[in-house]
Amino acid sequence: MTEDELKLFLTNMKLIYQHGYSHSRNKSRLHRLLAIHNCHYVVEQIIRERAKDMPFRGALHKIAFEEIIKKIHKKQNIQDYYRLLELNKIRNDAEHSNIIPDVDTVRFYVKIVGDFLKWSYKKYHEVDYESLALEDMILDAPIRRVMLEAKSLIEKNDLQRASAKMYEALAAFKFMSFGFLSDARISEVTFEGISLANLLADLAFKIILAQDESALKKLMPIRTSFAWVEKGKFGVQSIWEVEPFKNKEEATEHYEDILNIVLTYQDRMPASVWRTK
């Protein structure tokens, strides 16, 4: 891999892990399965990438993960090696036998994988895990800037302003998406006092987010609608409430949830929707 390709690969693995972490905070069977799947996936990709420098009999992609990780560990100890082997068994049980681990087990292994990624990025690639900013992957430039402001405010413990910024970014994400998912031409057509344009957009959001209850809970309370701008032109406006946070940890969790929503669903819209400046 070139340096740029490596950075993209490691950033994508970090993003997939973050999705797994987000799923682990939900107690449902589906979310527990997705958390285990995502976490095992990133471990396997990192291990297989490491194995490319080692000799194996046959094509690497045909060799089982367990065989690869055992050979790598013999050459160089892997952090939490036995836990990762157990994770492999848990993943196989979940996906092939429908045995889904409980919430505490899922969260335990999610933490193990997070620690492994930080270790392996440094050990295998001399890359600081924290230096890979997922915000760089946000397609919309103004949303990216506001999210970075929110992140900086969290670090300064200015949680009220951080909350205002991160929900401003989420509202911007919704109104940019709203402009594509609805149609200003029917904004004045109403059904029981509700704009048909708003109803269509709400329905579209619910279809897109049908399997992501946590994203729905964050996006749907933001009230987005068309509004007159000038000379017969329509714009989009959003109204939202700022979430109060008790501490940095809670603020960081909300921030990561919002970042995951943006990064997960931005590709559901055409690239032309997002602003480049």
Image (spheres, grey):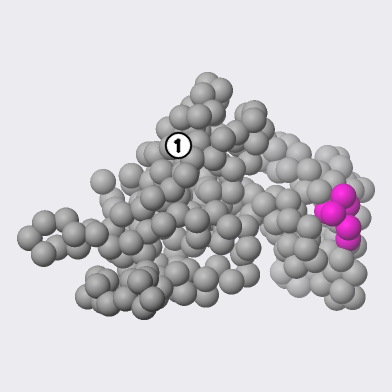
Q: Residue 96 occupies which quadrant of the picture?
A: bottom right
Residue under pointer 1: 164
Whether 74 is drawn above or below 261: the answer is above
Query: For this rendering, which residue is in front, 89 or 224?
Result: 224
Q: From the viewer's perspective, is 257 left or right of 24?
A: left
Q: Is residue 105 magenta?
A: yes
Q: Is residue 112 magenta?
A: no
Magenta-drawn segment: 101-106
For the image, the number of numbered tags is 1
Q: Secondary structure at mark 1?
A: helix
Q: From the viewer's perspective, is 148 left or right of 81?
A: left
Would residue 33 be seen by someone viewing this image from the given angle? Answer: no
Q: From the viewer's perspective, is 267 left or right of 63?
A: left
Q: Position of residue 36 (x, y in %)?
A: 78, 59
Our reading of the magenta stretch's main secondary structure is: helix
Q: From the viewer's perspective, is 260 left or right of 65?
A: left
Identify the amino acid type marked 1: Ala
Q: Residues within 10 Å of mark 1 (few under 14, many from 20)?
A: some
Residue at x 55%, y 54% (from the top left corner): 218
